[in-house]
Amino acid sequence: MSYQQTVFANNQFYHVFNRGVEKRTTFIDKRDYSRFTDSLNYYRARDQHVRFSFRGRMEVDDKNTFSGPLFAEVVSYCLMPNHFHLLLKQVNDNGITMFLSKLSNSYTKYFNTRYKRVGPLFQGSFKAVRIESDEQLIHVSRYIHLNPLIDYLTKDLRKYTYSSYLEYLGIKKGFCHKNYIMDGFSSPEAYEKFVLDQEDYGRSIKLLERAIHEEMA
């Protein structure tokens, strides 16, 4: 896999990720995770002329499905203490780039204000890998959802609330376009079995990812 600058194309899927500058923690408590998730929901819509900080939380929650055009569709996501993973489908020209720019800038301003710091929060520009097949799409979704288990943040993925996993299992509502993944499974239980049966696979991929990050540092 290559992590060089990606040229994004409409109707294509991408695994997008980034980590905190100097590997610093980017999500410290529940409020931080909630803020990023709400911003992820809000800024995927293209015609948002008001910054998220000036909108009411209930107003955002009520717009889980936007009627207007989107920058990108969020297929799945996972937030970790010092990095994030997103599985996105670009639906408009420059959509992913614009989406990630607005999302990162908004969250960085929030974080810097709350914790009285200055400067960039995330490490340079985000990294992205184009998904090349339906099989890869499903495996990347599994890998994203396995992250908290792989990194030993939890022993039970159902108890980790900072990802789209519970949305996929039908336990909570959300804004992800799950159909791209769930159309390949007979039920949420079948998807859960698929994810958990591959824990060892996910752990081996995580080791590979860490080696790649070290080379990039």
Image (cartoon, helix red, strand yellow):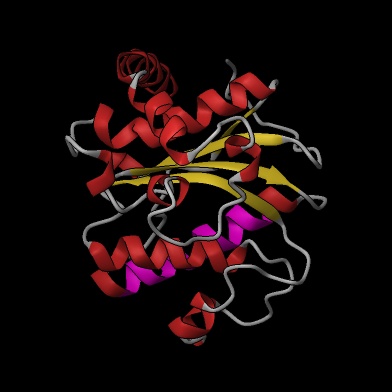
Residue 204 on image: x %, y %: 34, 12
Q: Residue furthest front?
A: 186
Any part of residue 217 in sight: no
Compared to 119, does 129 lie above or below?
above
Residue at left 66%, top 51%? 73
Compared to 145, does 165 lie above or below?
below
Q: Relative to the observer, which residue lies in front, 179 or 61?
A: 179
**Secondary structure that dominates the magenta span:** helix
Residue 80 on image: x %, y %: 31, 44
Residue at left 49%, top 76%? 61
Does 214 appear in magenta?
no
The N terminus: image quadrant? top right
| Span colored in magenta | 97-113
Residue 123 on image: x %, y %: 43, 42
Instruction: Specify the quadrant of the image occupied by residue 119.
Output: bottom left
Residue at left 74%, top 73%? 47
Compared to 135, does 137 lie above or below?
below
Image side of residue 81 versus residue 46, left or right = left
